[in-house]
Amino acid sequence: PQYNDPQARLAWMDDHHVEFAIVVPSLGGVVETYMEHDPEQTALNLHAFNRWLDDDWGFVHRDRIFTTPMVSLLDPDKALDEIRWIAARGAKFVHLRPGPAGNRSPADPVFDPFWQCVVDAGIKVVLHISESSYNRHASARWSEQPHPNAWSISAFQWTTSYGDRPIMDTIAALVLHNLFGRFPDLQVISLENGSLWVPYLAAAMDKMKGMGRNSPWIGGRVVDRPSDIIRHHVSVSPFHEENHRPVVDVLGIDRVLFGSDYPHPEGVAEPRQYLDGLAEFDDAAVRRIMRDNLVALLP
C-alpha cells in the first residue's frame, strides 16, 4: 500500500524515521521512448499522468512527500504549457527523461522559456534513470535488443546505453551548452543513476572544453570550469554499494544525497542500512548526506 497511497507512505516513513522524501514514478519514467514519434500524444499522456498524480498524491503532500510530475521536451510549446500548469499547482520538483529531446539538446536555447519558468517557480529538476531511447538508437547496432524490457536489459546495455551514458550525456549537454550560464539559479538532481560516472565526466569536460574551444558554442560560450559548474548546480544520489569518496571529492559533501530504490535491487529495505557505506565519514558529513543536503533543496 505504501507505493500507492500517500497516507500509507507517510506511516511507513514514520516507522522508518524518514522525514522527507522525493518520490519518483517508476514505470512512468520509461513510457516516453515508446511515444516520442508523436510529440502531441506524448504531451497528452504525460499531462494525464500529472493530473492523476496531483489528484491522488498532490505535488506536495503534508510538506513531507514531494512528487515529480513529468514533462517531455519533444515540443517546446507543449513543454512550456505543462511546466506552467505544474508550477501553478505548487510543484517543487519536475522529472525530465535523461537524453536528448528528439534531435535537440535539452539545453538548446529553444527551451529557454521552459527553463525560465522552472527557475521563476523555484522548481528543481530531477533526472531519474529512464528508457532514454539509447537502446533503439545505439545498442541495437551492437547486436542487442532495441526494446528490452526491464528484466532483459543486458550487461552490455547497462554498461553502454541504459546506465551511465544517458545521464553523462545529459549533464554534459546542460554544462557545455551553457544552460547554467544562462540560468545560474537552476538546480538539477540525479536520482538512481549512481555516481561512478561523476569523476570521469568532470575530468573529461574540463579537458574537452579546451579541445573544443574554437567550435561553435550552443547556448553561448562556457566561461567557468565545467567541474566547478556541476559542483554548484548538480546533486547526485549514489547507489548504496558504491564508494562515496570519489563523488564527494568531485562534488563536495553538500552535493551527495541519500536515496533508495527499494524494492528494486539497487535499494536498501531499511533506510539506515545506507549508513553501512558511510563508515569513513564523520558524523557531520553523514548528517549532510542522510538529511541536510536534501533539506537545503526543499522549499
Image: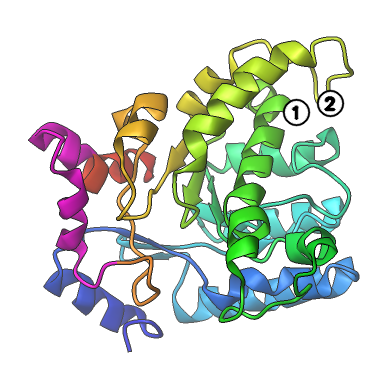
Question: Image check: 190 left or right of 177?
Answer: left
Q: Nearer the viewer, residue 150 or 145?
A: 145
Residue 271 percent across, percent down from the top left:
21, 63
Seen at 41% across and 28% down, the residue is 251
Q: Nearer the viewer, residue 153 or 215?
A: 153
First to last magenta residue range: 268-288
Q: Secondary structure at mark 2?
A: loop
Q: Disc 1 to disc 2, how far (Cα)?
A: 5 Å
Residue marked by disc 2: 218
Residue 33 percent across, percent down from the top left:
76, 69
Residue marked by disc 1: 177
Q: Are marks 1 and 2 in contact (CB under 8 Å)?
A: yes
Q: Residue furthest front?
A: 143
Q: Of helix, strand and loop, which mostly describes the magenta segment?
A: helix
Residue type at the position of mark 1: His
Q: Quadrant of residue 39?
A: bottom right
284 part of magenta stretch: yes
Residue 181 percent across, percent down from the top left:
66, 21
The C terminus sits in image quarter: top left
Residue 49 percent across, percent down from the top left:
63, 77
From this viewpoint, is residue 53 visible? yes
Question: Image check: 182 left or right of 188?
Answer: right
Q: Quadrant of residue 264?
A: bottom left
As displayed, is residue 192 above or below residue 150?
above
